[in-house]
Image (tube, rainbow, N blue to C red):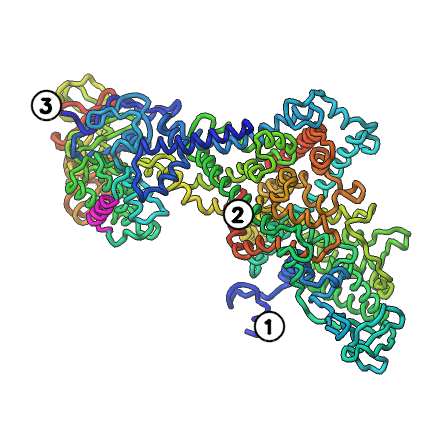
Amino acid sequence: MTHTLELNDIRKSFGQVDVIHGIDLAIEDGEFVVFVGPSGCGKSTLLRLIAGLDDPSSGDILLRGRRVNGVPASERGLSMVFQSYALYPHMSVRQNLSFGLENIRMPREEIRSRVEDAAKLLQIEHLLDRRPGQLSGGQRQRVAIGRAIVREPVIFLFDEPLSNLDAELRLQMRVEISNLHAQLGNTMIYVTHDQIEAMTMADRIVVLRGGRIEQVGRPLDLYNHPANKFVAGFIGAPQMNFLSGTLDGRVLTLDSGMVRDVPVAEPGQGETVTLGIRPEAVGVSLDGHGDEQITVENYEQLGAVTYIYGVFPNGESLTVQHAHQIPLTRGQTIGVSFPTEAFHIFGGAGERALEMQR
Amino acid sequence: MTPAGLLMAALGLFWGLGGTIWLLSHRRYTLRQVPQFFMDLLGFPVELAQSMFGRVGVPYALLLPNMLIFGFFTFLPMILNLYVSMTGGGSIALFDRPFVGFEKYADLFDCETIFSPRTCSNPGYNFWTGMFNTLWFVLIQVPALCVVALLTALVVNQNIRGRGFWRAMFFYPVMLSPVVIANIWNWVLHRKGALNAAIGETREGLSLLAGVAGFDMVMTVLMAVLLLLASERTLRAQDDPSTAWAAVFGLLFALVCGWAAPLSLMGLSGSFWLGVALAGALVWLVSSGHRLARAAVIGAGIVSVLLLLMVQFDAVFDFGRYRPINWLVTPNTGWPFFWLVFVFCWSHMGFYMLILLAGLQAIPRDLYEAAKMDATKPFRAFWRITLPLIMPTLTVVIVLSLIRSFQIFDEVYLLTGGGPGRETFMVVQNIYEVAFAKDIPDYGQAAAGSVLMAIVIAVFTFFQLWITRRQSEL
Amino acid sequence: MSIATFLTRTRGNRDTAQPFGVQDFLAYGYLVLGVLIILVPVLWTFFSSIKSEVAVDSFDTRVLPMAQVEAEIDGVGPKPVWIHTAPDGTRTEVFKAGPTRMMTEVARLAAPEDVYEVPRDELAPKEEVRVAVENYLDPLLKRNGQENFHFATYLYNSVFVTVAATLITLLINAMAAFALSKYRFPGRLTFTLLIVATLLIPASIILVSLFFVVWSFGIFGSLWGVIIPAAATPTGVFLLRQYMLTIPDELLEAARMDAASEWRIFWRIIIPLSLPALSVLAILSVIWRWNDFLWPLIVLISDPNKHTLQLGLTQFAGEFNSDFHYILAMTVVTLIPITLVFVWLQRFITTGIATTGLK
């Protein structure tokens, strides 16, 4: 079976600067794939390579098994929603939607019906005769998506489409794009720097850093089994806690003092490792009992949850997410406990996650 | 049919016919898309480049027409100029022209001293006369034009009513053609024209008035009142003297000084200019907020009252009979040259004013407000904020007007024809006449002149850019 | 608020109103003086052009077009009417029956036979305001021997040159500006520098060899010889390039995703979005081409049928050096089209050139 999109060892450099260092990826039909990573990780470049707006320096891009390197963007049958929407300001919404169809010389009747279907789907029928300048941010976003839809593309490409919207609209559009994916069933590739967008929308997330893929997987797999410290830190909010320590045999000694047997697959030889533990996995006891004690530096009572920001005596900091309301004061000492089954241990080159015996 | 004609025909055939065939074989057009077809046909070379070389070929195809015209009609002539200047004879066929080396240049330099064109051979005399006239013209014209344009831009940029109207009025002459301008000014400056009539009538009226008994006394009192009012207003402004009133006072002072002519007691002339210089110094003192400003205003007030007592107003205003001047024709008066500068300013000022105005409006208001908070005097604000920030625009204006003034031809040719004698004979007119207006055209001579002129312009432009670069580094 | 404050305030609302100070007085004085210097010659030319031939030739400096009244006298024919003011103050309308001498023979209009003598200085012409339409109509309609001003031909040539040159300029300059602003390609800097270089090559120093080039192309003496060499303007390329740089690249990429060819992107996206800059260039180009003088003088002078308005007017003024009334009228005719355009578009022209142009 051929994949909808296949990337084989894609590399891209601008002059002397290498931006993408060899990426292999296969995307199945109908998948919603999110490229996520900090700014400058090459995710947008990768999207532009797929779109055909830039050409890779080496490697192959295969669309439905056909090599499309050098095929211009217009002939790849993809469509893209840009960060700034890139609506043609001098054309009405209707002309914006039909421009691409006119370019491939589609019969007038079909253009009309496609534009109207898309408008109905996105509930922008009443806006068809307006200019982009007369629309609100959310409406522009819909028009931009509409322009992508009418082409009936093999793959939709989204380049940070929600970053120009305010928080409330962003939430709403997130849901709408997910619904749209469910309705249309097309393959979608979505680029964002926001891990929440990635977690909520994706079938599969591709985490990128420095032009390399760090991990590919379903959202919860990434959350539960991050392949390395970077992914572990990038996915999830508040961020995973990282505590440094040493691993000797199967005994983990944290710098803050705690000693614990850990079921690592391969025993260590006294090397430095990092223990990762999610804030919500940390247990709290107000009377100071537990594996360690921390001093509360700051806390946030949100009602449903409480965030506690504390420091160990050795200066390392710890974030705790507690699912109840608890009375706290600054400077107070509380006890925290770390369940072993929630441990992620990162060590070695690239701080990869060590395998556990489960 | 000329080779160029053949080339054009071939190009047309390729474009029209080839394009139609190519487009129809690649794309389908319905009847409704006929306009689109013609649009595509217009851009056929670009489409072809894209389909042959991909997007890489497109910019070259886009640049092609523009660069072809630049190449054939700007760069090629530029190089040909050198070739033509080394050939002689009157043949129009380029390759029929005998090669004469530097003979044409030698003719131009055939002078005893180059700074005195009268000692040159005939072609040298004409060329160098034109060149020196042009240099004079540029040296007077460019600063005058820039100062007037900047002053006008500053005034229009004030918080005044109807800014659009004033701006449009000053721009209007830019739209007029040189022929129209020349006809208008020829008519106004005619010996019996409106200007002479107006001057004559004004002088006659003033002379009559001056003859009335008691005129001297009335004028003395009037001027005294005006002087007192202006100086009092200058000093009355709350914290420091007002610049605008100081300017009014300065003008009055200069007039009184000119009329009283204190220098003539020592047998010297130029009292008026002395007055202007003193008034200028006074305005400068006041506007820069100098601590001596008050004392200077008071002193100048006392001096002006003393001078006022010396003025015999009935003698000053008795002009006698006016003999109309033939502005554009009378030799050795400097008037033809003056009017040339004036008309050139009149017709081009608006354009440069607009550019400067745009530059002025790009200066953020906050800067002036900040300066005001720092108690900066207006004059200092102009010198330290406006001028440095307008400098890039001013440089553009200077370079543009420099190149423009060097090429002056239309206005001179139509107003004075280079006369009287050779007083306003400019270098482009020399080139034009040598190459196109003589019975036996001497293209080589004209080309040699063009080359020399190009060198002079290049030197001037680079010198100017070099100076302003030094300034902007400060 | 007192009336004086109301009349002299210059800006702001009631609260921030400032009195009309001496600074405003100087500013307005300067502006009014400037506008008078600009307008008076033009208006004076206009008012002179509607005066009768006699008034123009005698340099009548009154503003209104006064012309002497003529009357049809029985048995004598049309005669100019004079008013005789006798020493006692009685005024009589007369015509001159003989040559003008110290004592001139005159006769009343009603009684042409009854000739009597009056002192010359008691006679004054009887005048009325009359617009001398014939100054305009004679050359335009080729009446009264005025057959050398082919207004229609000149106007056609001028309009043709202006329109054709402007269209070509807009098209090819926009294409070049598009290439220089929106593509990264080897040689971009070279091309940009070449165009800067042409900015510094004034037309008049390549006059002679441009003549050779145009001659070899076979367009010497034709209107195309004026149109084509001037079509590529460095100013236009830079003006448009500067403007196109502000068009976001994403729009072009969106269009590429929409399967638009590069030419179609140019035509459908770039051109409509550059309209403000294009119209400024169009106006500049119209001013340049309409007012062109030296190059048309060289290329077109030998064929009167190819003269532009400017050349035609020059030739006309040269041929009839003393017929000021016709020259003035034709000057006004020549300046009217551009004045109308200016009045119609002035706000647009001045703000356009100021904001978009030439930085």
Q: What residue type is labelled 2?
A: Ile
One can see residue B142 in this view: no
Check disc 2 and report its element: helix, strand or loop. Answer: helix
Q: In this view, does A153 lie to the left or right of B109?
A: left
Disc number lying in front (3 or 2): 2
Secondary structure mostly taken by the magenta-highlighted segment of the chain: helix
Q: Give the range drawn in magenta.
A: A108-124
Disc number lying in front (1 or 2): 2
Q: Name the residue under label 1.
A: C4
Figure quadrant of the N terminus of chain A: top left
Percent position (x, y) of residue C234? 54, 36
Of residues A62 and A188, the one drawn nearer to the viewer in this rendering: A62
Disc number lying in front (1 or 3): 1
One can see residue A15 in this view: yes
Percent position (x, y) of residue A294? 22, 37
Q: Mark 2 points at which residue?
A: C283
For marks 1 and 2, the one nearer the N-term is: 1
Residue ID at (21%, 26%)? A6
Of residues A253 and A17, the one drawn nearer to the viewer in this rendering: A17
Label 3 – label 2 distance at C-alpha = 80 Å
Q: Which amino acid does label 3 sit on?
A: Gln
Could you say which quadrant of the image residue B139 lies in?
A: top right
